[in-house]
Amino acid sequence: MPIGIIGAGAIGQALAYRFVAAGEQVVISNSRGPQSLRDLAASIGPALTPATVAESAKEEIVVLAVPWRRLSEAVAAADVLDWQERIVIDTTNPLGPPDFKVADLDGRTSSEVVAELVPGARLVKAFNTLTPAVLGSDPRTFVGRRVIFLSGNHPGANERVTRLAERVGWAVINLGTLTSGGRLQQFPGGPLPTLNLLLEP
């Protein structure tokens, strides 16, 4: 099944490139519509299909790769009332342009907030701790495989995302639940963001 990506900014493009390079089919969308993504699709290849947000949201695995301030708008455009246990990967961090002010999460992790926006989904926090340039680079290096952190409340969903990431080439460290693990990988505040770690063979 294709992977849906909502958001075609730096993170969305980096993940699309790496997924396609690993042989995955990807359906990507943004707020401006499929026509605005034709050049991106041409540069990455035929396995990347431009789509509407609603079309991307139909896939079994959906990646949210939008700025925090656009998150509610993007989820609304997905037009999904019940995600019916589909996997949603949250790559967001609770700050962004224009002022990069940190959002008030009322003591929760950002993914706990995101989980409320996607009722019925099995949410997995992942791909939020590396810069787009690092995320889009080959995760297999001569030293070892680049590390990706993830966390989530559904073991089956965590395992599914782990298998996907490992097919691409990343080494995965499961941090546990959205509360405990999500706090470790949250930016700002957690100790893991920006760490570019390699797992030696």
Image: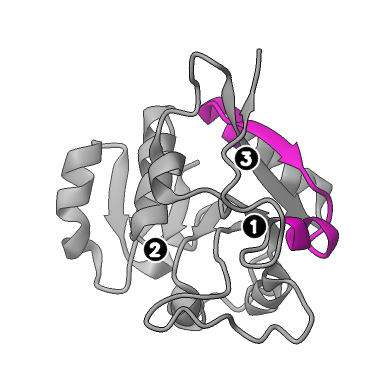
* SS assignment at label 1: loop
Residue range (magenta): 164-184
Amino acid under label 3? Ile
Q: Classify residue 66 as left or right of residue 62.
A: left
Return the residue at label 1: 86
Q: Quadrant of residue 188?
A: bottom right
Can residue 76 be seen here?
Answer: no
Circle 2/circle 1 CB separation < 8 Å: no
Circle 3 sits on which residue?
148
Mark sitting earlier along the chain (2/1): 2
What residue is at 44 percent from the left and 56 percent from the top?
Answer: 5
**Dot 2 corresponds to which residue?**
7
Residue visible at 49% across and 13% down in the picture = 142
Residue 169 has which mark? none
Within the image, what quadrant is residue 180 found in?
bottom right
* The C terminus: image quadrant: top right
Q: Per the image, is 89 magenta?
A: no
Query: Considering the numbered disc 3 on the image, is that residue within a helix, a strand or a loop?
Result: strand
- What is the three-letter code of the residue carrying label 1? Arg
Q: Is residue 181 magenta?
A: yes
